[in-house]
Amino acid sequence: MHSILRTLLLLPLGATSALAEPRFVDESDALPAPHLYTGGWEHFVGGGVAVLDCDGDDRPDLFAAGGAAPAGLFLNRSAPGGPLSFEAGTLPELTGVTGAYPLDIDGDDRLDLFVMRVGANVVLRGLGRCAFEDATEALGIDPGDGWTTAFSATWEGDGLPTLATGDYVDRDDPDGPFGTCADVHLHRPDGARYAPPLVLEPGFCPLSMLFSDWQRSGETMLRVSNDRHYYVREGREQMWRLDPLEELGPEDGFPEQKLWGMGIASRDVTGDGLPEVMLTSMGDQVLMLNQGDGYVAAPFAMGTAAQRPHVGEDGRPSTGWHAEFGDVDNDGLADLLITKGNVDQMPGMAMEDPNNLLMQQPDGTFREASAAAGIATVARSRGGALVDLNADGLLDVVVVNRRAPMELHRNVTPEAGAWLAVDPRQPGGNRRAVGATVEVRTEAGTQAREVTVGGGHAGGSAVPLHFGLGTAEAAEIRVIWPDGTVGRWREAEAGAVLRIERD
């Protein structure tokens, strides 16, 4: 414990001081109509949102799950630096959607969507101008007919990506849903199409997955976060090696861990270049500190447990869903958004459960700021995003709620720090350089972020990586590409979105 705290107090970024108190204004009415995630017990979980620029205008658009109602596509028409504004896009009518993740599956430099559903999953190929077509059959992807709640993707070669899908419980099992965890599938390409999926056994009701080179060793692994509520007796969190395909255990630096796993967030918090992992849960939210050869749980004093409502009189345990790191005040320190909400009417858990905004402090601890910032809403939140929606360099908040309208909160933090964003690209099938690590350094230290597809709860973003710079007016940037090639350091002025093409 003392060594962990000592590490936190010696952060390379520790010289950076907090610049401003975060502030948001509710602009949910910027959507063309209220959007809700609805449905019965099959939509207790899910409710994700995918963030992508689908029309190439450098403004992030939103694809939101609808559950029993149709999914929604919202096209961003916000003026730079101004209020948020969206209009409805056109989609094939898709119901039963639990969430979606954006990625460029076919390497044509247009973002596609892997849409998870209760029923057959769908791959929507981006055609430009926010038009999509169903490419599931053309790619040979087995859509399944289950209850898909988790997804991640990586590239093992230069063609199509490897996809992982996780089904929650077997909804057709007459003895279910308790104890009827369904399978995890690995979809590997075979030329221009996909081979039949491999089953990763055992499966323990996954609600989030993430491919990551968490050791920065060149080996990508698959982390699976599982729901303890449905565990069979040996249920646990899981880490899978891809070659050879095997589950890791305590002897591999991955000791057995049980929690009500809901979502995953990953980012270097301690400044050593290794990504930490935030695991949302029912009860404590668990921040795992990356030791290089394994993880240890962060001490309670770090302030990340967020185990009970921080406002109101409901003292019962919280239920965490989507987690996402992002520098809300641009001070150079990664902050943390956690969406909260009761599954439905679980009496042992808090019913009015406000979302969290945990602001990282210069000493490495975190401070709750959601209520003062204006985003401590108490609907049954599910998916979410931290993303700059109006090109002002400040990360805004998107929240999808179960049976309550979707929320948009515009960041109006006064006197925030400087910033820049980095969009690495490379030739070949992995056009968006998934698996690359982007490093940004100033006098305050070096920040590192990995380009990933997955994590969160039922949704994620494919937008340039945002970095707060504090008081720095410029920074140096380099990209460590997915094959390990180290790019050169290059200088950049603050306030820019930089596309870095691989030489």
Image: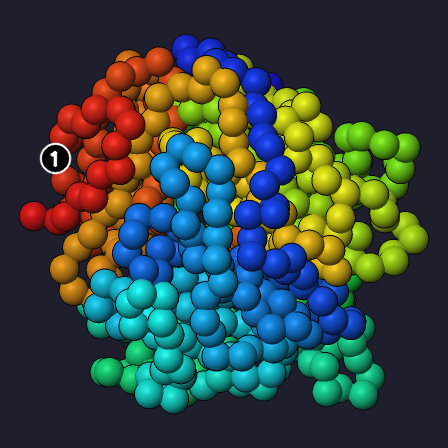
Quadrant of the image for the N terminus? top right
Residue 5, image x and y in percent?
Answer: 57, 20
Residue drawn at (72%, 40%) of the image? 377
CA neighbours of label 1 inside 10 A, class few (<14), some (14 to 19), many (20+): few
Residue drawn at (19%, 27%) of the image? 492
Q: Is 444 displayed left or right of 51 in the figure?
A: left
Residue nearest the observer in this picture, 153 or 275:
153
Q: Is residue 78 above or below residue 206?
A: above
Q: Is 181 displayed left or right of 460 in the figure?
A: right
Residue 33, image x and y in percent?
Answer: 61, 58
Residue drawn at (81%, 88%) of the image? 174
Q: Is residue 133 visible?
A: yes
Task: Give the quarter of the image for residue 366.
Answer: top right
Q: Is residue 452 visible?
A: no
Q: Is residue 477 above or below residue 60?
A: above
Q: Is residue 45 above or below residue 27?
A: below
The three-letter code of the residue at mark 1 reads: Arg
Residue nearest the observer in this picture, 68 or 492:
68
Residue nearest the observer in this picture, 172 or 233:
172
Q: Is 141 displayed left or right of 309 in the figure?
A: left
Residue drawn at (26%, 45%) of the image? 423
Q: How many marks?
A: 1
Q: Residue furthest left?
A: 503
Residue 59, image x and y in percent?
Answer: 36, 48
Colour treatment of the image: rainbow
Could you say whether the residue bearing mark 1 is in a helix, strand or loop?
loop
Residue 480, image x and y in percent?
Answer: 22, 43
Q: Is residue 477 above or below residue 132?
A: above
Find disc 1 in the rendering and name its residue. 488
